[in-house]
Amino acid sequence: MGKQFYPIIAGPTASGKTALSIQLAKAIGGEVVSADSMQIYGGVAVGTARPTEEEMEGIPHHLMGFLPLDDKYSVARYQEDATAAFEAIYRRRKTPVMCGGTGLYIQSFMENRQLFEEESDPELRKRYQELADAEGNEVLLERLRLVDPETAGRLHVNDRNRIIRALEVYHTTGQTIAEQVKLSHSVPSPYTPCLFLLDFQDRQNLYDRINRRVDVMLEKGLLEEAKRVLATDPDATVTQAIGYKEFLPYFRGEISLEEAADKLRQQTRRYAKRQLSWFHRMSGVHTLWVDACGSAEELVTQAISIYETFMKGEDV
């Protein structure tokens, strides 16, 4: 079997990833595989900006809206699900188009990291926390140094939670975190990614798009969706998502709706900065400057040209 190429459309929230991925999929005979840690949940279409059936334009989308709100999910599960979606798409002689803003999902899949469902032992974790409270973090770090000196050497004595997690991993799995990291990079990916990053030469253009998106979400019923989401299990991952927790003070009568919306805009802008920082650190990135393109069509044309050149093995 020859190389199995696929494009990735990555970038910050509100940058236009969804629209580009759909048009690119139409051009190359593809199907979209979401890489968004919140779009996997059902019942949160507004706050996660999940595309509507009309917006999908007949392009099949995978890994969207399939998980109950109170379910837990992990990077390991995402890799299993994304791999299954890729294999099915390739069997249909189509091309997967990965699209999303969750950098950890995208990077882990690109690098084919060998991950496993995390084991946990709440009772063990509690005992370590009590030990640290009584005798100090130094005692924990010394215990970690005895079983996993490599990880212990990378952690500061004040990183109590990470020290406890490393000890928990060792005692529940029999492997150190250092060993798991080495194992995770041992198998090369069978797929060859072409990573696109949507960015803006003038960052204010992105922030303006984010501000407008919040207004549109409120018009589409974000407030009602947030009320329903926040009424679920308070420990559920989705209740901590940007777009929902910002409305808690409003529902409690502590702030106005406009103040809550402003907080959402601010938090989303900060999240976009973190997303861009993550993707810019990755290697092999092909940056598409959204605000330098005269139209959406021009952006699609650029992406197709780069992807075709990439598949030929030529310098882009």
Image (cartoon, rainbow, N blue to C red):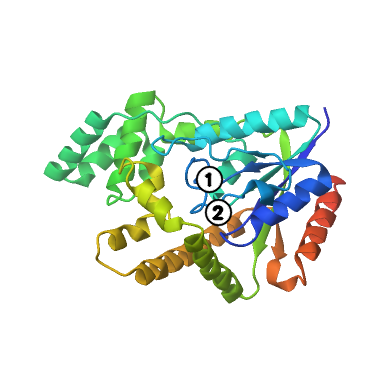
Q: Earlier in the sequence, mark 1 or mark 2?
A: 1
Q: Tell me the quarter of the image containing the N terminus.
A: top right
Residues under numbered marks 1 and 2 in contact, where contact means CB atoms less than 8 Å apart: yes
Q: Kindly identify which numbered label has been placed on residue 49.
A: 2
Amino acid at circle 1: Gln
**Element at label 2:** loop
Foreground of the two, 202 or 217: 217
The residue labelled by disc 1 is: 39
Left or right side of 285 for 203: left
Q: Tell me the quarter of the image containing the C terminus.
A: bottom right
Left or right side of 66 for 248: left
The residue positioned 55% from the left and 54% from the top of the image is: 49
Residue 293 in sight from this viewpoint: yes
Image quarter for residue 123? top left
Amino acid at circle 2: Ala
Foreground of the two, 160 or 1: 1
On screen, residue 177 above or below 300: above
Foreground of the two, 289 or 185: 289
Foreground of the two, 286 or 18: 18
Q: Measured from the top left, where is residue 152 in percent x and y?
A: 35, 42
Q: Measured from the top left, where is residue 240 in percent x and y?
A: 37, 50
Residue 147 in sight from this viewpoint: no
Image quarter for residue 202? bottom right
The residue positioned 48% from the left and 47% from the top of the image is: 44
Left or right side of 224 for 138: left
Please tell me how crowded label 1 is: few (under 14), some (14-19), or many (20+) other residues with Cα within 10 Å. many
